[in-house]
Each structure stands twice: as C-alpha cells, then as structure tokens.
Amino acid sequence: MSWAAIYSRSFSYRFPHSPVSARVSRKLSTLSTPSSQRTKRSPFIALGVAGGVAVVSAFFFWPDTSRSAPTYKDATLSPSHFTPVTVLASEQCSDPNTRLITLGVPKQSLPSLSQTSFSPIWSIFIKDDDIQVERTYTPLEGIDSEGRMKFWIKKYPKGEVGKWLHSKKVGDTIEIRGPLMTWPWQDDIWDEIVMISGGTGITPFYQLLHHTLLSSQQKMTKTRFTLLHSSRTPHELPPADILQPLLSHAQAYPQDLRVTLYVDSLDETTTQHPDLRVSRIGKPDILSALGVNDRRRWWSKLFGNSSPSTLEKNKKILVLVCGPDSMVAAIAGPLGRNMSQGPVSGILGELGLNEEQVWKV
Ligand SMILES: Cc1cc2nc3c(=O)[nH]c(=O)nc-3n(C[C@H](O)[C@H](O)[C@H](O)COP(=O)(O)OP(=O)(O)OC[C@H]3O[C@@H](n4cnc5c(N)ncnc54)[C@H](O)[C@@H]3O)c2cc1C
C-alpha cells in the first residue's frame, strides 16, 4: 500500500464531515474500553508496542487498534496510547465558533522532538472523554521544548468533539495520542507549492510554513510557497496569531511566500480592504499562483497546449488543498472511496494538473 493510500485511509482532512463520513468516523473512533480500565494496564505493554518503525507501520495499517488504545500517564507521547495533557489556554477568536487552545504535554511524557514523526505535516488525536470518541487536530507550530501545542479549533452546530473542546477550561486534563503523519513534507523537491485552504483547513499549511519559513532566521528550503485562503466573512478569517506572521513574512520576503485572502462576502463592520478579495478562489487566481501568464496560456492554446504542467515543464509544482468537502471538490475534485485521493478534477483538473501535482490534505 502506498503512503498516499495509507494517509488517505486514516487521516484525510475534511471540513466539516459529511453526515455519513461523520457517522462512520465516529463509529471507527469509538473507544471500546472505559478509561479507568485503560489507565491500569501494564506500562510494559506500552513499551512493547511503542518502539520501532515496524510497529509504527502496523499502527498505520491497522488503525482500528486505536479503538482500545490505553492511557498511560508516565509514558512518552505516542500514537499507540493516550497521554493526559493540560489545557494551558483557551481564547475565543473573532469568529465565536473558533478558539485558540493551547495544550501542555507533561515533562515525563515529552518525546524527543528530533524524531521525524514531528516533521510537518502532523496532527494528533484528541479524545472526547464524555462520549469516548477521538478527532484529529493540527498543532499550528508543532510542539515546543516545553511540550506546548497551540490549535485553532472550530466547533460545528451538531459536531461533537469541537463543542466539547470549546467547553474545556484552563487547568482541565484531556487525553491525546500522536503524532500522526498527515502529509510528508520533503525538502528540496518542489519549486512551487500552492496551498489552497478554506476555514480551519489553513492549520496544516500554517504548520508547514511555520516549520519552513517562520520559525527560523534562515530560509530552510528552495521551495516558494503561495497560500490562497478563503473564509466566509472577514470575522471568520483565522485569528491574528495565524494571519499576522504569514502576512508579515509575505511582505518582507515576497520571493518566498505570497498570501492572498478571500471572503465570500463582507460583514457589516468590515469595509473593502486591498488585501482582501471578495470572491471565491477561482481559475485565474490559481493560474496566477502557479505563475502561468494568461497571454502564454492563450498562445499555447492556439497550439493545442493549455496545461500549466507542460508550460512549466522544468518546474516542479505541487498544489495542496484542504477545506470543506465542497471546496475541495470544486478545486481538485472529490476524494475517492475509502477516503482515497480520487482523480484530479475540478479547476485543477481543467488546468491539466495530474495526481503527482495535487494532494488533497
Ligand atoms: C488530519 C486532520 C487534522 C485536523 N485538524 C483540525 C484543526 O486543526 N482544527 C479543527 O478545527 N479541525 C481539524 N480537523 C477536523 C476535526 O478532526 C473534526 O473533524 C472536526 O473538529 C469536527 O469534529 P466534531 O466531532 O466537532 O464534529 P462531528 O460530530 O464530526 O461533525 C462534523 C460536522 O458534520 C455535521 N454532522 C455530524 N453528524 C451529522 C449528522 N448526523 N447529520 C448532519 N450533520 C452532521 C456536524 O454538524 C458538523 O457540521 C482535522 C481533521 C483531520 C483529519
């Protein structure tokens, strides 16, 4: 099974879940063993299953084992068991349906952060202890040496875990397991990465950009990034903690990062702003992000060649898309059966991009 199939099988990022996929994923992630019993299991079992690449692979191949994952207070953070962590902060954002939540992993559970499993893009499972279900969330800046992880988390009107997380107070304990690889960033492969996100779908892209551009004085890659992000209204845009570092970096180093923000409509309090486009992310926006000049495109079309991938044949480009199902479908085509990637269609398909050039995160 390819990495792509493994990732898509377990960790496809869809906002929000369709009713069917929400029901299926709730069923899959229901934890069958009561937490009190799980905490009493021998730590030797955890040590036995925690180490080694083979066992990590087994985790990916048999994600159902997570249903009975035990909880260990003193073992290192791992995908194979839950670790209790503390809520360090929970701040309401301008969109009242979203909060910035910071969790703290206790010292005794802090793993070696040099592990490749902490390379972007990774996420963790958070368990809703009331109803024994787990959902995946993306630490915006990864994890720091003190064990802190910050998340931007949305609650949905009928969603379960998001609402439960919003109700947690500073000092509360919750259980997490991970890290889980969402998509494997590799340095020095791509000349251009274009990221297209909607809503909280920006979180994996923020983590990637934080790792490659924002967290270091020196640029760590040859890749040039473009982020096209869309929210419904200005007040639903990501909070300043996310947007400010991105916009400042884009302003200082336009050769490394370009950011364009889109909203479906303005709200009463926001007036038109030059950095904010009131429209959906469309074909011209994506063409321009890919560096395809329209004149060349029409010239090429005359000769039967309209594909940006062939126009830029010496350039290695990748488009990552993450957001609500409907947005992903319109831009890159729907995910396939069993959360596989599915063929590239939508706008990117019309532009001639192929499976190697598009990833639905
Ligand atoms: C790799 C990965 C990383 C992620 N990172 C983040 C992140 O950083 N931040 C973030 O906010 N989210 C993130 N998510 C999404 C997150 O995991 C959850 O899917 C999301 O929070 C919704 O979970 P929930 O339990 O609150 O809602 P669910 O109960 O799963 O419901 C989700 C949506 O479906 C609707 N729904 C559910 N059941 C029904 C039904 N029966 N009928 C009609 N509608 C229904 C709900 O109203 C809601 O709109 C990530 C997902 C993945 C896979």
Image: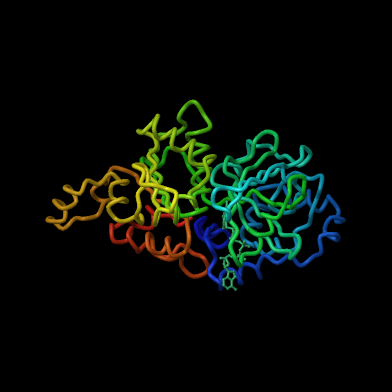
Q: What residue sits 66% from the left and 43% below the top?
A: 102
Q: What residue sits 44% from the left and 33% below the top?
A: 248
How does the figure colour the protein chain or chains? Answer: rainbow
Give how far across and how far down residue 71 sits, in percent.
79, 54
* Ligand 1 occupies quarter: bottom right
The answer to which image quadrant residue 67 occupies is: bottom right
Residue 353 vs 143, above or below: the answer is: below
Residue 89 vs 58, above or below: the answer is: above
Q: Nearer the viewer, residue 246 or 95?
A: 95
Q: Nearer the viewer, residue 274 or 109?
A: 274
Q: Classify residue 36 as left or right of residue 172.
A: right
The answer to which image quadrant residue 66 occupies is: bottom right
Residue 68 vs 254, above or below: the answer is: below
Q: Nearer the viewer, residue 149 or 234?
A: 234
Q: Classify residue 61 as left or right of residue 325.
A: right
Q: Nearer the viewer, residue 172 or 110?
A: 172
Q: What residue sits 81% from the left and 64% below the top?
A: 34
Give how far across and how far down residue 281 sits, in percent.
35, 54
Q: For the view shown, which residue lies furthest in the front direction?
A: 268
